[in-house]
Structures are given as structure tokens and as C-alpha cells.
Amino acid sequence: MRGQGLPNRKATRRSIAAARSAPKDAPSLSVSVASSVDAPVRLIPVFAELFAGLEALGSRPGEIVRALRQAGIERASRVIDMGCGKGAVALAAATKLGCRVQGIDACRAFIDEARRTARARELTGLCRFRCADLRSLRSGRYDAALMIGVLPFAQAIHVLRPLVRRGGVYLIEDCWWDERIAPAPRAAWTRERAAGVIGSLGDELTAVRTSTPSTVRRLNGALYRRLEINARRLMRLHVGLRADLRVFLARQREANRLLESALRPAIWTVRRSGLLDSTRPLKGSDSA
């Protein structure tokens, strides 16, 4: 979920899921949409109400804009945000950098809100939003491609790298496991493992922006309170969804608990410089 300075809970949950087990078959689109926010599939029809008041959906638009600026993204640049949610990052980049941004998300409710916000802010000339399956885009010539906590790290590389021109950048928000706090599970991403995967493609890891534990706790607490208010309201309106809403809230609490352990949300900036094919199995990746 997204908001300036807010650690990416989606990235945390996808990292947790990847550390437990990675499904071998591609999930259905509805399952992918629901899992991207760690919600039961039955809640998709009420996503607009469940995530009301949460434009940024757990990402950090301000931090991402700073990372893009540091990477050289400017007024003439073309950017694509894969899994853009309600468009907070795309809109912030267009506003502060003047770049053109294409936002892609499979959740119709999120795309509808992104379009409304773009119209209200008079940004339709710079921001366009499309409801589509992320897996349907195979190539591009963008200056930057973003994926903010939608897929685990190695899978995000497979999606983003073919969309970026040589010399461009791709940004991934996902968690890494801090081995200074606890030994890493076999499938967990450490900074060293991520750097190895990137290096195997001939690309360059240029920056890693990691949230402090105190910031994670403070801001995730505020986010959970908003989600709980929305979920309790929906429980009163939709009796048949009460069990699913309770499951959703329990998953949010679990994510908060794990974020107080060794998982560290971070924004990874990678410059594409290599010629290697990122569709082949990645060195050091069990999930690719």
C-alpha cells in the first residue's frame, strides 16, 4: 500500500510468501490481484471501500521520486509503473519530475481512482493508467520501470528488465533479510544475494534505500488503524464477508510482526547495462 515515507507492506508480504514456498504455475489474474495486497479473493469487489483513504497503498512516493531523480530521470523521460495501484507514485513522479508515466494495474477499482485523481490534478497529459495483466507486457524502451512490492525480487526483474532501454533503470521495492539480526531462511533475499543476481545479468545495483525499524513500526501502525476502520465498516455492511475481512486483518498484523524482526523494506535501483537475457534462470535465484 502506498504513502510518502510508508514502508511497503506488499513487498514484505510477497517476500514472506516467497520464503515459504513459490508456486510453480502462474496464478489466475484474480488470485494475483488479491495476493498483491494479501487479501482473500472474495474481497476484490469491495477493494474501493477496503482501501479508502489510502492513496499510496503502502509505498513511498517521495522516496521513489528521489531515487528516480538521483538516477537521472527528468522532464523528457518515459517511465512505466507496473502494479501502479491508485497511481500515487506515477502522479508524484509526473508532478515533481515532469516525466511521462504509464501506470499498469490489474485492479479496476485502483485504476479508476488513479484516473480520477489524474483528472482532478490536471495531470492527464503526463499520466496514463491502464487496467491490464502485468504479464501481458513483454518489451519496451522506457527510461525507467518500477515495480513497488507486487512480485518477489527475481520475478520483478524478469518483468521490468525487458521494458527498459540499455542505460535506463529499473526500481524494485521488496524486502531483504538482515542477517545481523537473525540467520536468513534459504529462500530469503539478502543484500548480497540480490547483488549477485543483478551482477549475473551484467547490470549495476546503484542504490538501496532501506527504512529504519522505528519508522516501519510507527507508520505501519497508522496504516493498520485505517485498514481496521474500513474493514469494521464493511463487516457491518456485508455479513457474508466478515470471515474474509478477519483473515485480511490477521494477515496485516502478521506482516507488522514480521517487519519488527529481520525483514527490511527497501527500494533497489538498478541500471541496465548488460546484454544478457533476463528470461533465462537467474544465478542465485530459486524462484526465477
Image (tube, helix red, strand yellow):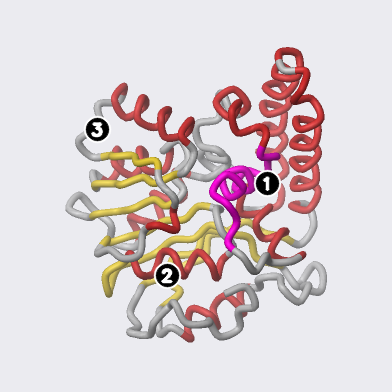
Residue 149 vs 284, above or below: the answer is: above
Residue 244 vs 138, above or below: the answer is: above
Amino acid type at mark 3: Thr
CB atoms of marks 2 and 3 within 8 Å: no
CB atoms of marks 1 and 3 within 8 Å: no
Q: Residues within 10 Å of mark 2 (few under 14, many from 20)?
A: many
Choose top left, top right, bottom left or bottom right for residue 61: top left
Identity of the residue furthest to the top in this view: 237
Q: Which residue is mark 2?
A: 270
Which numbered disc covers residue 128?
A: none
Between 218 and 225, the residue placed more toward the observer is 225
Number of numbered discs visible in the structure rendering: 3
Q: Where's residue 266, x and y in %?
A: 57, 59
Q: Where's residue 141, x and y in %?
A: 24, 64
Depth check, mark 1 against mark 2: the one in front is: 2
* Boundaries of the magenta span: 26-41
CA distance separating discs 2 and 3: 28 Å
x 67%, y 22%: residue: 230
Between 170 and 135, the residue placed more toward the observer is 135
Q: Which residue is mark 3?
A: 124
Q: Which residue is mark 1?
A: 216
Quarter holding the C terminus is bottom right
x 76%, y 77%: residue: 186
Amino acid type at mark 2: Val
- Does residue 7 show up? no
